[in-house]
Amino acid sequence: MAYSQSKKLTAQEKKLLTLRTQLYGKEQPEAPSVKIEKPSDFKFNAPGKDSTLIPSNTHSEATFLRNDLQKIGILAVVIFSIQVLLYLSINRGLINF
């Protein structure tokens, strides 16, 4: 049994290959792989004289992480303040069981 060594695929090429097999099945002949040099997000300018692609990194992972941590912090402060209010109201007799 001969072992043929092939080049290692990048993660993006593996994803494309998986999607291609899911879409066309295994019997479909393989299409030539498309190699992308630097994957990044792009946004289009308004149509006109200058219609070039401009990289857009406004939504990076750090931004999403920061927003999630802010939401978690706000929720924690609200829950902690509710617990303190309940404790004080039970001890002062405002809430009876």
Image (cartoon, rainbow, N blue to C red):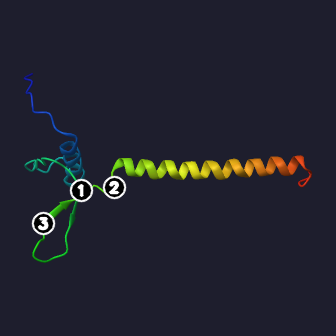
Q: Where is residue 50, by image quadrant?
A: bottom left
Q: Label 2 vs label 3: CA separation?
A: 20 Å
Q: Which residue is mark 2?
A: 59
Amino acid at pointer 2:
His
55 vs 41, nearest the viewer? 55
Disc 3 is placed on an element classified as loop
Q: Position of residue 9 (x, y in %)?
A: 16, 37
Q: Residues within 10 Å of mark 1 (few under 14, many from 20)?
A: few
Residue for badge 1? 41
**Near-viewer residue (14 or 74):** 74
Q: Identify the residue shown where x is 37% and y is 47%.
A: 62
Which of disc 2 and disc 1 is earlier in sequence? 1
Residue wearing tag 3: 52
Number of residues whose C-alpha sits closer than 10 Å to that of mark 3, classed few (under 14), some (14–19) or many (20 or more): few
Q: Secondary structure at mark 1?
A: loop
Give the residue type that dot 3 points to.
Thr
Instruction: Name the residue type under label 1.
Output: Asp
As drawn, the label of residue 85 is none
User: Please, what secondary structure does the residue beneath circle 2 have?
Assistant: loop
Which of the two discs, 1 and 3, labels the residue nearer the N terminus? 1
Contact between labelled residues 3 and 2, with CB atoms less than 8 Å apart: no
Query: Label 1 vs label 2: CA separation?
Result: 9 Å
Identify the residue at horizontal 18%, vertical 39% (top origin). Answer: 10
Residues at badges 1 and 2 in contact (C-beta under 8 Å)? yes
The answer to whether 50 is drawn above or below residue 58 in the figure is below
Q: Is residue 34 above or below residue 10?
A: below
Give the Cα distance between marks 1 and 3.
13 Å
Q: In which quadrant will I find the N terminus?
A: top left
Residue at the image position 64 percent from the left and 49 percent from the top: 77
The one nearer the camera, 66 or 3, is: 66
